Each structure stands twice: as C-alpha cells, then as structure tokens.
Image (tube, rainbow, N blue to C red):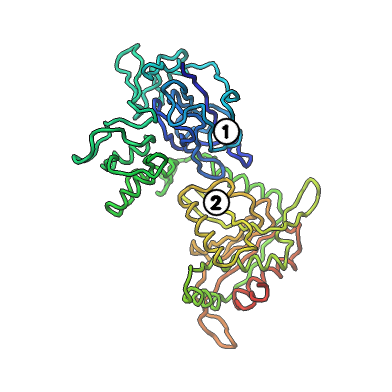
Amino acid sequence: MAQVLEFKLPDLGEGLTEAEIVRWLVEVGDVVAVDQPVVEVETAKAMVEVPCPYGGVVTARFGEEGTELPVGSPLLTVAVGGDAPASGGADEGSGNVLVGYGTGAPPARRRRVRTSPVAPVRPADGALSNGGSPAAHRGVDGTSGPLGTGRGAGVDTAAPGRAPVPERTDAHGLTDARERGSAGARTTGPVPVISPLVRRIARENGLDLRELTGSGPDGLILRADVEHALRSADGTVPQAETLAVPRTPVTTSTPTLGADTRVPLRGIRGAVADKLSRSRHEIPDATCWVDADATELLAARAAMNAAGGPKISLLALLARICTAALARHPELNSTVDTEAREIVRLGHVHLGFAAQTERGLVVPVVRDAHTRDAQSLSAEFARLTEAARTGTLTPGDLTGGTFTLNNYGVFGVDGSTPIINHPEAAMLGVGRIVAKPWVHQGELAVRQVVQLSLTFDHRVCDGGTAGGFLRYVADCVEQPAVLLRSL
C-alpha cells in the first residue's frame, strides 16, 4: 500500500513568511522524483524553484497560479510507495535542503502520514483510486472529479467511478512511447524525461525527445538539453522560454482617463515599498552632490581593456573607488542599532547595486567587495546582473548589504536624491556621463562630466565626513592615479 505525504511550503530563509505561486511545474497525476522542482514561487526577495523531498505520484495541488501562500501551508500531496515513486522513492533522503526539511534521515524518522483525502496507490497497477474528501477531488482547474482534470495531467476520468490511470511510466517515472516527433525517430523504449515542462517545450517546438541525449542522471533529459537543442537548430530562443516570465501584468499603455487602477503591493514591489517607507520613517537622511570630470576615468578603463584579458566595467571601477573611500571613512559603512542606541561600524564591505528588472527594483549584493580587484568585481557584477535579468537571484544574493552604489545614469538622468537602503547608512548615486563644457587646465574644453550624489544617515556622521567621502570619490574619478595610493 502506498502512503500519501503532504509537502508544505518550506521556510525559504531570510525571515520570509509567504510566497506567491508563479508557475506550477507539475500536474496532478505526474510522477515526480526526489528533489525535482515542482513549483516556481516569488518571494519578497527573489524567484525560486521549490523541490519536493518525496518521490511518487502527485495526487493534489493547493493554490492556483497567482495565489499567495504562507510558509507552512500545504503545497501538494504525493502518493509514495508501491510502484508509484520515481527514481529513489520516498525512502531516500532529499539532497536538496530547504529550511524546515532535513535530508538523509532514516526511513523510520520520516514524517508520518497524515489523515489523507486520497486513497493509496494499488501496488498491482499503480492506478490511483477514488479519494474520500472534497479536498482530494479538487482539480487544478477548480473542477471536481478524481484528482482533478488538470491540463496535461495524463489522468483518465472518462468513466464515472473508474479509477484514474496515470500516464504509463517505467520504474523511473519515464514516459512511454507516445512522445514521438519526426518520422525517423525510434519507436521503442521509454523517453528519459520526467518533467512535464520539458515535454511541453519539446512538443510546442516540434522537437523529438528521442533524438536527444540527456545530461541528467542516467541520461535524463533536462530543460537545458531541450533549449540547447532548439538553439542549435535555428539559433533562436524556444517558444516556451516565455514561461519563465512571471504572469504579473506590466502596464505599458496610458490608462484611460477617469479609470482607476489598483495594483497590489506584494512580492518584490511590496518589499521595496516597505523598505523605502521604513527608511524614510527611521533615517534622518541628508544629501550632498558634486559634478566631476570623468574623462580620465574613461580613458583609464579604455587602456585597461586594450591591454587584453577580461573586460573591466565602469561600474567595477566605481565600486573599487567606493571601497577605497569607505576604508578612509568607515562611518558610512555602518548601521544604527536603535534599541541599543549604538552605531555599529561593519568590518566588511558587502556592496549592493541597484538593478531594474521586469519585476521591479532589486539590489543584488557583492560579498566582500573590499577584497576584490576590478576584474573580480566586473565578473561578479555580470553574474548578478544576469541572475537579476532572468529572475534567478537567491535570497542570499539580495541581503546583507552594507553600502549601495546606484547607477541611475542608465535611465538618462543627471542627478537624484537616493533613498537609503535600510538598514544601511549611505548610498552613492551616479548620474549619466555626458559631454559638457568644462574648464580644464585653465581653458574651456568639452569634457565627460558626471554628477555624483551621496545620501547619508546623519546619525552616523556629520556633513564633514560625508563631504570628505564624496570629494575623495570625485578626485578618484577625475584623477584615477589618486586611487593607486590605497592599493
């Protein structure tokens, strides 16, 4: 007899208490393996795929796409044991640890079966029998019936009262010979693929899965294998790539006059709103700014890149200048402990940088930026920027910053008064670099000018310290050789 185990939304770390379901990766009736991602959720920090610690047949899902669930609420139920589990079954520990879900525990210590709304799997044929309570019969599309009739679930519900039959699979949960593509494809043996998302991408793009060699365990075909094959075939991005984009609508047109629109403050947008409001409420901030001639800095970067090797980004050079300035003015790399009424000067510089994404503003963090050179900083900025663009930043990538660098020049503006990223004490803003008339060596010339602004917490320092920091940054921008003194 099989057991039906309930998988709850785990604690994703960093104090997060809820998450929004962006996209289900499995359907009711699908066979899942231990540690297989089953749902993509968006927290206040990032988009993450949640792996299931059990292997078996999905018997129920809880929550539609777009629904917010608190940590600890049920996500899905899985029938394990008998012929149901895929590759490893429920008796093997999950190797993908989430907070609240251990790994490698002996079978006797695994979570006991709760009173289940779904009857166990019959060992004889693996078919799921009729469940007992309405919760068990709630389908993924909101209809009733044995295990629901979700899209692509592969469950036979044609005859009332007859047990639904999952899609035919082998012992490892691999699909049968029904997934065929071109006429030249092999017609026998299972297709080594578990994920219904992978099958869908292949089906929508006319790709024969039998022609692929999987890079996963035991030749398992992964999503990356399918996307690589499609790109290799025609050099384009597969149609299903758009599935990675969250379903939150983005308004691009001007609303009709007189029509009110309500946009929920939740997810990343809600987290940003809360943090900015708290910053304005708690921090007595002040801003100073200065124009600087960036011509020599641009020339120095061009010379570095002309010398060969990995390219150095302008943002990396500005970050290196920031870390040198913070070494001279450590008051700005601090936080205020309001309960203890203490200023805590931090021993490491974890440099955040503002990045605009389709889901809103995020601030990825470069760890130990003060220990990195320009080349290392360039590589880390590139990695985090790509992760922000694709929505794969982890909560750890977005927390722990001690100082923020904000390049709002990418929006084509000259200046701004940034809001401090609470609980930090300061943020350096960099405007666009634009050709302007400038007095250089006693003569009027056209130079590349940038406006720098520093917003700081007036509790941690006075204007003299803030001005000294900003002046040092401007001096390094105008004369990069000044930076050599601190290297």
Q: Residue at x 69, y 65 (%)?
A: 326
Q: Residues within 10 Å of mark 1 (few under 14, many from 20)?
A: few
Residue kind at label 1, given as amino acid type: Gly
**69, 286: nearer the viewer:** 69
Residue kind at label 2, given as amino acid type: Val
Q: Residue at x 52, y 24 (%)?
A: 6
Image side of residue 308 versus residue 212, left or right: right
| Dot 2 and dot 1 residues touching (CB under 8 Å) | no
**336, 415: nearer the viewer:** 336
Q: Earlier in the sequence, mark 2 or mark 1?
A: 1
C-alpha gap between disc 2 and disc 1: 35 Å
Image side of residue 433 versus residue 346, left or right: left
Q: Secondary structure at mark 1?
A: loop
- The residue that mark 1 highlights is 104
Image side of residue 100 versus residue 217, left or right: right
The image position of residue 17, as x and y in percent, is: 60, 35
Quarter of the figure with residue 170: top left
**426, 49: nearer the viewer:** 49
Image side of residue 92 versus residue 198, left or right: right
Relative vertical location of residue 154 with respect to residue 416 in this rendering, above or below: above
State the residue lying farthest toward the left: 183
Q: Which marked residue is nearer to the observer: mark 2 or mark 1?
A: 1
The image position of residue 327, as x and y in percent, is: 70, 66
Quarter of the figure with residue 220: top left
Q: Secondary structure at mark 2?
A: strand
Q: Quadrant of the C terminus?
A: bottom right
The image position of residue 49, as x and y in percent, is: 49, 39
Which mark is on residue 362?
2
